[in-house]
Amino acid sequence: MRKLIARTACCLLAVAVAACSKQEPTVAAQPNPPSSAPYAPAEPDTSQRVVSGNTPAAADIAAAAALNASFSPQRDPAKDLETAKVEAQRGGKRVLLEVGGERCDWCHVLDNLVEGDAEIRSFRDANFIWVKVNHSEENENQAFLAQYPEIKSYPHLLVLEADGKLLHSQSTSELEKGKAYDRRKFFALLKEWAPAAPPNQAKP
């Protein structure tokens, strides 16, 4: 009888020890499920024309680039000039108006010279805000052009200070060489009317 009681006590003690030593299984943390929504990075707003020095940089670049994209009868040259003045004052540049039209062959010859010559294009972009002003049957922009000297042939160039003051009126017929423009003469014109370089930076 004593042996049976002792065995029973031993069994109960073993069960108790086993129960105490048993640990709860650890539940692994589950990662957050991936989102099914496509990633959409924020896009800069380039729809606003530059009107002050506080506009987004992307809008500034887009607006300035649009000024010399093409001769458009729909564009307002007065508003374009205001945009150009802001950019010129901010960048220490001058404004260069190119008056012409999409049907003007010599206008395209001039554009090809500038766009096809990396040195000239780089110098122009570093020193001028280039603005195309349309003059065509669809829109002669007479009211805008009336403030400048009479223009007899196209394209015609008008160099303005950053505040819009007229500095020079240039007939491009004087820059022609055969059926093209004289690169040396045109580049010399840009260098002559580029804004003065800082004392520690000489013009090329």
Image (cartoon, grey):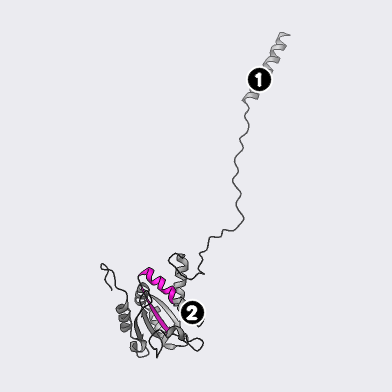
Residue pushed farthest right?
1
Q: Nearer the viewer, residue 39 or 83?
A: 83
Residue 197: percent from left, percent from top: 29, 71
- Magenta stretch: includes residue 87: yes
Image quadrant where one finds the C terminus: bottom left
- The quarter of the image holding the N terminus is top right
Name the residue rendered at 36%, 87% in the picture: 172
> What is the CA distance from the residue labelled 1 to the residue labelled 2?
97 Å
Question: Pointer 1: what residue?
Answer: 14
**Of residues 2 and 161, which is closer to you in this image?**
161
**Mark 1 vs mark 2: in front:** 2
Query: Residue 194 at x, y = what percent?
Result: 32, 76
Say whether disc 1 or disc 2 marks the residue closer to the N-terminus. Answer: 1
Which amino acid type is shown beneath numbered disc 2?
A: Asp
In this orientation, does residue 6 appear?
A: yes
| Residue position marked by numbered label 2 in the rendering | 76
Helix, strand or loop under label 1: helix
